[in-house]
Image (spheres, coloured by chain):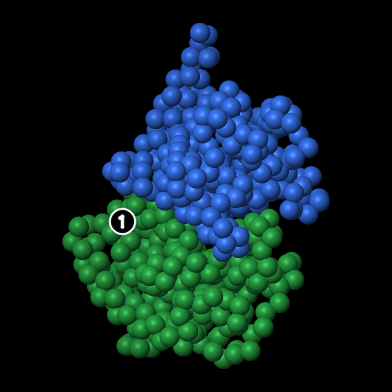
Chain colours: A green, B blue
Amino acid sequence: MSVQTLTPARGAARTIRAMLGRSYPRIIGANRERSWLCYDTVLPLLGTVAFVYVYKALGAPERFIGYVIMGGATTAFWLNVMWSMAAQFYWDKQGGNLELYMVVPCGVPAILLGMSLGGMVATVLRAIAIVLLGSWLFHVDYSLVQIPLFVLVFAVAIVALYGLGVTFASLFLLWGREAWHTANLFMEPVFLVSGFYFPVSALGFWVGMGASIIPLTLALDAMRQLLFPSVHPGLLPVSWELGILVGLAALFIVVARLSLKKMEFLARREGRLSLRF
Amino acid sequence: MSDRLRRWWTTLRVSYWLGWQIESNWTDPFLFFIYSIARPLGSALILVFMFFVVARVRQGPILGFFIVGTAFWPFIVSGMQGMAWSIISDREHWRTLKYVYTSPIPYRAYLVGRALAQAASASAAMLITLLFGRWVLKVPIGLATIDLPYALAAFVLGITAIIALGLVIVSAAMMISGEAWRMPEAVGAALYLLCGAVFPVAVLPGFLQTVTQGIPLTWWLEAMRRGLLGSGTLRSFAWASDAQVLVLLAVSTAVWMAIGLAVFTLAERRARALGILDRESAF
């Protein structure tokens, strides 16, 4: 029996190899567990459908159903970032993987990049499934004319969002059970302030701007402006929102790098890396 | 009190205390309070803003419908899902299931105690959401609208129904090891859609309306709305009188309790026979 061996890599090659290795279980491995596919798609869809029926009970115009479906797809990203990025090191502590990540030569940043890449790809597929299923179930029409701009807003928002996820992951590195509860806490309150199920401008300009620290707030608003032009009450013009998202992406990448270093140091010093409970 | 009953009561009390400690001792009481109310209040406010952007008015009977639904929903999440998660966390996370199960206690009492502790943690959220609805949104909940005996009877039946459904989910969690921890959440999400938690079930397609009537939680939420908001409330079942709603809640609860106990007994036997009662897989 032959065993495939890899030549040792250094520098960027090692980082890329580690990144791809860590993303593999999220893109390929996760699909082997059929129930995950079902839960990741059906769970956000069930919540989405409930909110669609709320709008139906309120007698809302059809575009609101489109808002909810977009919000439901975005939920998949937020769930992925909170549970599979921010709280991931908590799970890894339980499973004993965190110590291994700390001693491998590629370092933790490559592992986090791999988690982000895997999470992004897997969640994009699930979000597309949610949008297609939701739009098919409720016959939603979109009038998307600026496809490149839509894709650009989406791509920049995802980079910013996963930058935020890495920042959270480093913060959660210190925590035990608090990590689980904090991730839990950042669900409905975030859905509220980011306008997942209604236009964020309804909260008022300054609340909307405050909530823009979460990249999904401006991303959702910009994408809704592009999908429902002339009827969606946007918080800011799309070009401004795109500019702010680019700034957030850059900011979170820098903050994530710094906070990871700091938190790793603190976690090592306080002996919390292998503290399970 | 017979010896059997005393053992049930002691186990229930101690497991309630244990459940409460697990739920709350990860932080200080103030933060725990904030944590307990943030999600339900967030849910209520999402619905309120959805109403505002569509109706463009500040008041309407559906606000009361939203407030009572979101106030009592955490009992379902905490009690029903919590009961399932208690067995999963004992098995997978704390790895204490085998010790608890083999100790000389009635295991059902232990699970019910854990579920009640989880449900108790939803009380603060319920109270704050109702007060928020009353004082901020001006939802008409007051002495004139509350039918206390009716609401209390409905509440007790509702908690019993939550435990009954919890037993069914625990039974499933015993049999599926790998992904058991996500299953209670999926059931909760399905019930959120089907039970008229945030919209009258009359807007659902016909066949789903029939399904909703078989779930005691639908009748529970309807009864709580009638008990707290009085005759001015928006109703999921306009054809049913208040007494009929309570009777249907009692009957469906009794049926689901019988199903829950039977399914739990079967699942427990099967899990023991297959040797999977304490099979770990998640960590």
Residue A11 position in % (x across, y down): 32, 88
Assess disc 1: are there few (<14), some (14-19) or many (≥20) residues with their C-alpha within 10 Å of its C-alpha: many
User: A55 or B258: nearer the eye?
Assistant: A55
On screen, residue A33 versus residue A242, left or right, reads right
> Would residue A56 be visible to someone looking at this image?
yes
Position of B82 relative to A78 (above/below):
above
Residue A78 position in % (x across, y down): 48, 67
Which residue: 45% across, 48% down?
Answer: B136
Position of A260 relative to B100 (above/below):
below
Position of B29 relative to A267 (above/below):
above
Residue B252 position in % (x across, y down): 71, 32
Callout 1 secondary element = loop
Residue A9 position in % (x across, y down): 36, 86
The residue to which callout 1 is attached is A175
- Outermost left residue: A269
Going by the numbered disc 1, the residue's amino acid type is Trp
Task: Provide the chain ID for the residue under circle 1.
Answer: A
Which residue: 45% across, 41% down?
Answer: B131
User: B111 or B271: nearer the eye?
Assistant: B111
- Outermost right residue: B206
Q: Quadrant of the C terminus of chain B?
A: bottom left
- Give residue B240's quadrant in the image: top right
User: A40 or A55: nearer the eye?
Assistant: A55
Which residue: 48% across, 30% down?
Answer: B113
Which residue: 48% across, 61% down?
Answer: A192
User: A171 or B148: nearer the eye?
Assistant: B148
